[in-house]
Amino acid sequence: MKQKPLLLTIAMLLFAVGTYSQACGTRVLDPQIAYFLKIVGYKDQTLEQLRSTPIEQLKYPQFPLIPYPKEDVQRLKITSDSISVLVFNPLHKENLPVIIHYHGGGFISPLVQGLEYSLWQDAKTYGAIVFAVDYRVAPEHRFPAAVDDSYKAFKWISQNAQLFGGDTSQLILMGNSAGANLVAVITQRAKKENTSSPIKLQVLNGLPADLRPENMEKSVSYQQNALGYFQTKAMCYFAVENYAPDQFNDPEVSPILGKDFKGLPPAVIINAEFDPLREDGVLYAEKLRNAGVKVWEKCFAGQIHCLIGLMPGAEPLKEFERIVKSSMNECLGK
């Protein structure tokens, strides 16, 4: 009987530690993000409202069109499937590291024009050539179309990037949200097919690693952040049912279900406190570490999915860039 209070105390301490690590902060939203949500007129939508909205309204999010030098980009159609790829080389140099970028958008949005400036900026920031893959999207093209396009583009770029000034022995795969899911899937497939050796680093920002509905219902971060913070649980459900209905248990849909993580490329995993997907990133990082994979992991307190809403030059964005740069330098031997 005397042991029960002690055991209870230990259990409460363990629970408190676990809760804090999951929260990654004090549950205080960054004032910049609160202002962003206000000025964009953000309102939560139920799953039923999303389903009744014309899909074209959801496919093309409105980002500001920031100009950049048009001579810094080439627009290609690659492979026999004519996959669209944009190549950004603002430095106009040779033998640069190659970043293959996979955009976000819930598997339903294509590579919209409003994202081009950020891709151009990434090429400058990281001293690299950025190949941005415009993979096919749902609901017109459901799983595995996005995976197949993404993997075929990876293989083509790994064989042809030198034609555009890239070093094919120094590939970094980078993805946001749905794009992070594709990066995780591609690296696993590349390992199985013995094509992963050029991949020196994977960068996963806002990773949906487990798309099973039961995961969404039990995940701490899905429950904490189901509403109110731009990326909602309803939006995650909507994306999954359009992208891969009834295929949630496939490891190429839910990469956390992969059987063997040993030998995967080192990974940067970026999470945000107010993101339903936060716990997915935490658990995927744990899977990789347990398999002996080098992981740089950061959860940004006060932020929302993929660090959306921050102004250019904001300290969290600078820290994100520092993490990616330092991991690139280590993995590329610089």
Image (tube, rainbow, N blue to C red):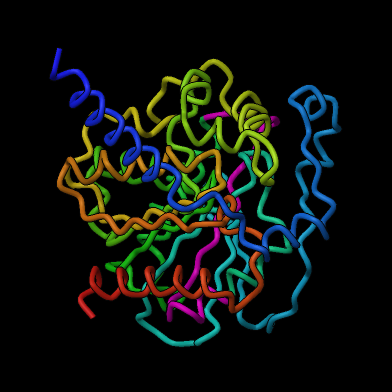
Q: Quadrant of the N terminus?
A: top left
Residue 203, compared with residue 141, is above or below; it is: below
Is 165 left, or right, of 224 in this rendering? Answer: left
261 or 113: nearer the eye?
Answer: 261
Residue 208 on image: x %, y %:
48, 39
Residue 305 on image: x %, y %:
58, 50
Is 279 left, or right, of 87 in this rendering? Answer: left
Residue 134 on image: x %, y %:
60, 52
Residue 183, compared with residue 88, is above or below; it is: above
Query: Which residue is painted at 28% across and 76% down in the image?
Result: 329
Number of numbered labels in the structure image: 0
Residue farthest top in this picture:
1
Query: Which residue is painted at 23% across and 39% down in the image?
Result: 261
Query: Which residue is painted at 22% across and 31% down in the image?
Result: 10
145 or 263: nearer the eye?
Answer: 263
Assess whether residue 123 is covered by the magenta stretch.
Answer: yes
243 or 283: nearer the eye?
Answer: 283
Query: Which residue is painted at 61% across and 72% down in the image?
Result: 74
Q: Quadrant of the C terminus?
A: bottom left
Residue 124, compared with residue 141, is above or below; it is: below
57 or 4: nearer the eye?
Answer: 4
Assess whether residue 138 is covered by the magenta stretch.
Answer: yes
Residue 283 on image: x %, y %:
34, 38
What span is in magenta? 121-143
